Image (cartoon, rainbow, N blue to C red):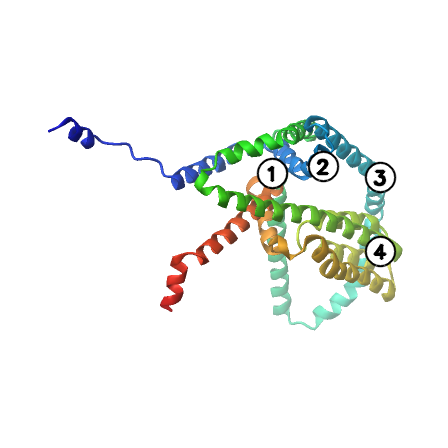
Amino acid sequence: MSSSQRKDDLPMDEPVTPNRFWFILALVLVGAVWLLRPILLPFVAGCVLAYLLDPMVKRLALLRVTRSFGALLVLLSFILIVVFVLLLIVPLVQSQLVSLLDTLPSMMSALRDRAVPHITAWVEKLSPEDVQKLHEAIGNYVGSVALWAGNVLKQVVSGGFALFDVVTLIVITPVVTFYLLRDWPQVTESTEALVPRKNYKFFRQAIDEINRTLSGFLRGQALVCLSLGLIYGVGLSLVGLKYGATIGLIAGILSFIPYVGSTFVLVSSTILAFMQFNEAWPIVRVLLVFLVGQTLEGYVLTPKLVGDRVGLHPVWILFALFAGASLLGFVGVLIAVPVAAIIGVLIRLGLSRYRASTLYERRRSER
């Protein structure tokens, strides 16, 4: 047997295919995120802030401002704006919450005195068996909802602040944000250099689509939240509802989660209106403020500021946020929308490539 034949007969190590490599890499990344989740919050928050603030640093770079100085200037401006807003909002919210806690017992007593006769008259029309079933159903439903909400809240709090308290978050997040803003071009170039050249076109298309979807949603939704907070806060205050400004502020923040902000406004403002007013017309005016806010959100704010072009369905966002909170706590809430956007874009691109493939055309011809 010749030496060349013996060489060909030697066992060769099976090469790692690209698909297997990316699959293993994805598993390693998921495992790392899961193991390091208690300490990820400041770094994830820094990444999110860097992504949101990077366009402003790029604009300064066009004016021949260095990345380091531009990153520092943008970050300091953002911190000053946040501090200024907090100094304006916190005293108002604090005073209204203290007042609400002081008057809540009397308001609850008044609401109970008004509601009990109507509930009693309605219950008296039911049979004892129906009343028993109603009590059991309400008890089971309320208990299940409270348990589920408590578990989600516990996951969010414990997952987000297991090792890092608020002080640590405030110290580390700006540092991470600054260095990411300064080195953003190098980070993106290094990432692109790892992509195989034959897959680079698809990678570039996916990155552009993800960036368009994510930036359009985050920045547009932030403007929607700000607008709704002003609409509800000013509107409820003008119609005479106590604590209307606080409700508007909380509603604006919660409006980032689809349906949650509007539900909070409807429930909280209606309950407070029934507690505060003895006539029907003031309550109707409170409901009109809610209807105006919902109409503007559905027909003006969301279409103009976010638009359907981002391709993120509200139900998909809602599921992603709750799934992220359940799995990774507050860190999961921060990365839920970016992950949802990435998965949605990859699914759409994958389906478009499938429809353009010979496999899809062959199946269409077989029908």
Whether residue 131 is situated above or below residue 232 in the rendered picture: below
Mark 3 and mark 1 residues within 8 Å of each other at the beta carbon: no
Residue carrying label 2: 59
Structural distance between the alpha carbons of marks 2 and 4 = 37 Å
Q: Residue 337: horizontal and vertical position, in percent? A: 60, 46
At horizontal 49% and vertical 55% (from top left) the residue drawn is: 352
Residue 325 appears anywhere in the view: no
Q: Amino acid at mark 4?
A: Gly
Q: Nearer the viewer, mark 3 or mark 2?
A: 2
Give the structural element (helix, strand or loop) at label 2. helix
Say which residue label 4 marks: 235
Percent x, y of residue 186: 58, 30
Q: Residue at x 66, y 50 (%)?
A: 257
Dot placed on the residue nearer the N-terminal end, 3 or 2: 2
Q: Residues within 10 Å of mark 4 (few under 14, many from 20)?
A: many
Quadrant of residue 89 in the image?
A: top right
Where is mark 1, residue-wise?
331
Q: Secondary structure beneath disc 1? A: helix
Q: Position of residue 117 (x, y in %)?
A: 78, 66
Q: Amino acid at mark 3?
A: Leu
